[in-house]
């Protein structure tokens, strides 16, 4: 899809993988075309291929200083790790004494390929040793005291030269002392994947038995790797077959990969006219990038020291931003970074930072920027410029406070979420007045930033009830925002106004020209209230736009009523009360959103919560309601078997048919249907950094409920939703579909694929 400002990608995820060096790619291609013989063939084509293989191996040997040790080509480091572990364990097994306890040791921050392989082969080979993680200290260095104590019982010890998440390197000489002083014969594997090209290695001069390498981490293609095996170290082939690699690793060789890897080793050996940046230059790049980062995010925290890390990795966290948010932001700025390791991108925290004892927030917010020795000054300058632009976009949307950058004006409802809990910020643009409902502890800084940056006048900070799952952060927020403390129930001002609705007076406060009414809705808890927003002062004629019902009506369920302070009977009457005050289009904004539904309506809830429908239809007695509700509360489990804190669960219907467009389908729709509206649902900072010419409307998830409310009377309008990868757009499409929007589609794969 066309972008108004096409930006080239700045790739800062080299520890996950690298692009192939153009010369390496050339070598691979010419090998495929010209040196395609099978090295096992004895004709001239075969001999040429064999010659290339020997040259590649020699180039690698020269750089790695492996002396008489073997250097075996593999498909990558994971294979090298398996081979090393099998070789060591098969040999160790034959010498195990009965009734003696053995262990397998690995560094706690090791790549998952290591502990997982240890576990797998320990079981499969029937060794059944204890598998123990060697702890690391705060700076990521292995605890040599632990090694000294445990290694005497070890069959293998696995450590890494450089960590893939933090760039922390180990002092291999110190490790060697600790290992060999206590167990001269234990097999020692060092994962050298992230050290290649960044740390000098002279393998023969060490007692390392096995060292795996991987081509794709240093500009060679995926599918080529190496395993160093010390002379006389035991070896068991992992792949048997035609006897290639002297019988050590069968399978027809990956010659193009080897040719490409050779180019890289020639560069490392200084035997190419192409050069990698030296360490001093890489250090300068790191300083420059760090400078840009700390200027852009003044309270950024570095997750490692600069002393014991390679220059090419920076791992940091920004307080109050999750890794996902920063990644989305950088992706919009066309900077590719990762959260923790790419192999575990679904996991939201870093086991490496956890092992280093860093705080939970650092682990959950960690971002890794990594580059390689092909980095140029121009790329580094551009990266810094983009980091500055990305931070400016955050400042514009008030997520970082700034005196220099003007904030985008705010009007209407904003939803802020932490996990599955929701906090609502209701603002009236013209008067700059605002109310905060159910402030969550994790969101205090974010709310503070928005309120200050928008210069909002806070009329009230309210809770819908005393929450069972968290402490209200009302008082903290009052202090932070320098507001006068009001000793009042759930934050409702003592001296509020009164509003007459259907002949009954309700306490109310005005927010600009809008009226927020408080209605007691006990049931879930005795103190539960609902706040209803009426857009005009004359509530007699206007309908309720939003109902903040706390946990009384949740999406897909009713709030649980099995706390000591609950009453199903009172809930029955509260539901009736709400039914009389809400209209069909009132959007119910709950305190929880377990399944990304954003908001709901009474009509929609009645269609899937039979008990609610019975109350609305007056077809159930209070006694029967109490009995049915107690049955529902007995099954407060979600699909994962976890207890849902606040409401009785009803499965979400995701079977709606959402139109999914690919690039061609989308383009043809845009040509033929001028009425279809394209909505970019990324956050405003992502939209500002990188927007499609065609998406004139930006409706971020935080503003979706406001958008739904403004368009709830036009459910026939065709909308096509687009986001970064197609995940958020699908969620929103499903949510809109459930609320009865009839013509919703989304762009499959988002901007990333189109
Ligand atoms: N070890 C480390 C330290 C790594 O970073 C990686 C790749 O992420 C691996 C092992 C696995 O390497 P490969 O992708 O070549 O199997």
Image: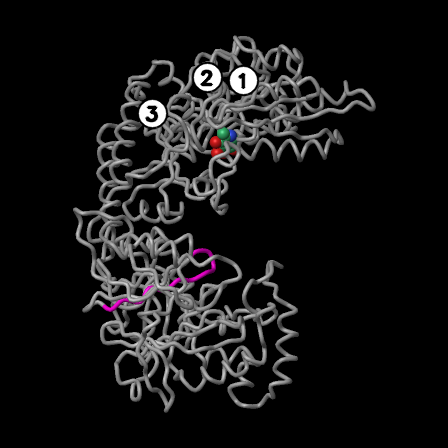
Q: Which residue is mark 3?
A: 373
**Residue 503 in the image: x percent, y percent?**
37, 91
Residue drawn where x is 52% and y is 59% of the image: 469
Residue placed farthest to the right in the image? 98
Relative placement, left or right, of 405 versus 489 is left
**Residue 753 in magenta?**
no
User: Nearer the observer, disc 3 or disc 2?
Assistant: 3
**Residue 563 in the image: x percent, y percent?**
60, 67
Tell me the distance, in whole angstroms, between the alpha carbons under discs 3 and 2. 18 Å
Marks 3 and 2, the one that precedes in the sequence:
2
For the question of whether residue 255 can be seen, the reply is no
Dot label at residue 630: none
Q: Which residue is mark 1?
A: 71
**Residue 217 in the image: x percent, y percent?**
43, 30
Q: Is mark 3 within 8 Å of ligand 1?
A: no
Choose between 511 and 139: the one closer to the eye: 511
Marks 1 and 2, the one that precedes in the sequence:
2
Q: Which residue is mark 2?
A: 60
Tell me the distance, in whole angstroms, between the alpha carbons under discs 3 and 1. 24 Å
- Range of magenta residues: 418-428
Tell me the distance, in whole angstroms, between the alpha carbons under discs 1 and 2. 8 Å
Screen quadrant of the N terminus: bottom left
């Amino acid at each position: 899809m066309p972008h108004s400002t096409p930006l080239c990608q700045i790739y800062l995820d080299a520890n996950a993988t690298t692009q192939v060096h153009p010369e390496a790619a050339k070598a691979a291609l010419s090998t495929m075309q010209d040196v395609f013989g099978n090295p096992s063939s004895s004709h001239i084509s075969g001999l040429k291929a064999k010659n290339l293989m020997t040259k590649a191996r020699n180039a690698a040997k020269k750089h790695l200083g492996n002396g008489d040790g073997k250097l075996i080509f593999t498909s990558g480091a994971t294979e090298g790790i398996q081979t090393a572990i099998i070789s060591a364990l098969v040999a160790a097994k034959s010498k195990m004494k009965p009734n003696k306890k053995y262990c397998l040791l690995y560094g706690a921050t090791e790549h998952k390929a290591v502990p997982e392989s240890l576990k797998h082969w320990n079981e499969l080979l029937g060794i059944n040793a204890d598998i123990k993680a060697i702890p690391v200290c705060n700076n990521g260095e292995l605890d040599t005291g632990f090694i000294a104590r445990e290694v005497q019982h070890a069959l293998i010890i696995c450590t890494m030269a450089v960590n893939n998440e933090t760039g922390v390197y180990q002092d291999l000489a110190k490790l060697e002392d600790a290992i060999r002083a206590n167990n001269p014969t234990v097999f020692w594997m060092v994962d050298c994947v992230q050290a290649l090209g960044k740390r000098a290695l002279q393998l023969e001069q060490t007692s390392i038995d096995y060292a795996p390498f991987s081509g794709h981490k240093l500009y060679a293609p995926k599918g080529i790797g190496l395993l160093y095996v010390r002379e006389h170290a035991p070896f068991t082939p992992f792949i048997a077959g035609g006897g290639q690699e002297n019988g050590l690793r069968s399978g027809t060789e990956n010659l193009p990969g080897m040719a490409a890897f050779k180019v890289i080793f020639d560069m490392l050996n200084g035997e190419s006219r192409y050069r990698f940046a030296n360490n001093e230059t890489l250090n300068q790049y790191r300083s420059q990038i760090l400078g840009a980062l700390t200027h852009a995010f003044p309270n950024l925290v570095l997750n490692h020291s600069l002393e014991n890390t390679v220059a090419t990795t920076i791992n940091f966290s920004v307080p109050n931003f999750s890794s996902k948010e920063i990644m989305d932001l950088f992706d919009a700025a066309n900077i590719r970074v990762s959260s923790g390791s790419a192999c575990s991108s679904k996991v939201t925290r870093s086991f490496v930072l956890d092992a280093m004892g860093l705080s939970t927030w650092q682990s959950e917010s960690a971002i890794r920027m990594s580059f390689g020795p092909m980095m140029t000054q121009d790329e580094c300058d551009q990266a810094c410029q983009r980091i500055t632009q990305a931070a400016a976009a955050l400042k514009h949307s008030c997520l970082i406070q700034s005196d220099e950058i003007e904030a985008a004006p705010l009007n209407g409802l904003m939803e802020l979420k932490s996990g599955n809990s929701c906090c609502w910020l209701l603002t009236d643009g013209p008067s700059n007045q605002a109310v905060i409902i159910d402030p969550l502890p994790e969101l205090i800084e974010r709310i503070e930033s928005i309120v200050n940056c928008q210069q909002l006048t806070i009329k009230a900070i309210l809770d819908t009830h005393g929450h069972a799952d968290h402490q209200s952060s009302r008082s903290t927020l009052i202090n932070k925002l320098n507001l006068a403390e009001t000793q009042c129930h759930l934050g409702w001002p003592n001296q509020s106004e009164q509003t007459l609705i259907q002949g009954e007076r309700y306490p109310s406060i005005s927010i600009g020209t809008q009226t927020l009414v408080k209605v007691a809705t006990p049931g879930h808890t005795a103190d539960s209230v609902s706040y209803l927003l009426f857009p005009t002062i004359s509530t007699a004629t206007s309908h309720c736009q939003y109902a903040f019902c706390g946990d009384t009506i949740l999406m897909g369920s009713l709030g649980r009523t099995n706390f000591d302070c609950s009453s199903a009977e009172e809930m029955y009457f509260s539901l009736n009360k709400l039914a009389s005050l809400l209209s069909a289009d009132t959007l119910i904004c709950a305190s929880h959103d377990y399944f990304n539904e954003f908001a709901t309506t009474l009509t929609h809830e009645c269609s899937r919560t039979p008990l609610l429908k019975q109350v609305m239809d007056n077809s159930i007695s209070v006694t029967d309601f109490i009995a049915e509700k107690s049955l529902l509360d007995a099954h407060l489990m979600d699909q994962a078997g976890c207890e849902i804190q606040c409401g009785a669960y009803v499965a979400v219907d995701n079977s709606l048919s959402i139109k999914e467009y690919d690039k061609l389908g989308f383009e043809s729709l845009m040509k033929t249907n001028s009425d279809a509206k394209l909505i970019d649902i990324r956050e405003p900072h992502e939209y500002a950094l990188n927007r499609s010419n065609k998406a004139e409307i930006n409706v971020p998830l935080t503003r979706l409920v406001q958008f739904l409310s403004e368009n709830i009377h036009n459910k026939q309008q065709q909308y096509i939703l687009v986001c970064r990868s197609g995940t958020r757009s699908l969620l929103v499409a499903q949510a809109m579909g459930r609320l009865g929007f009839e013509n919703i589609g989304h762009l499959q794969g988002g901007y990333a694929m189109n």
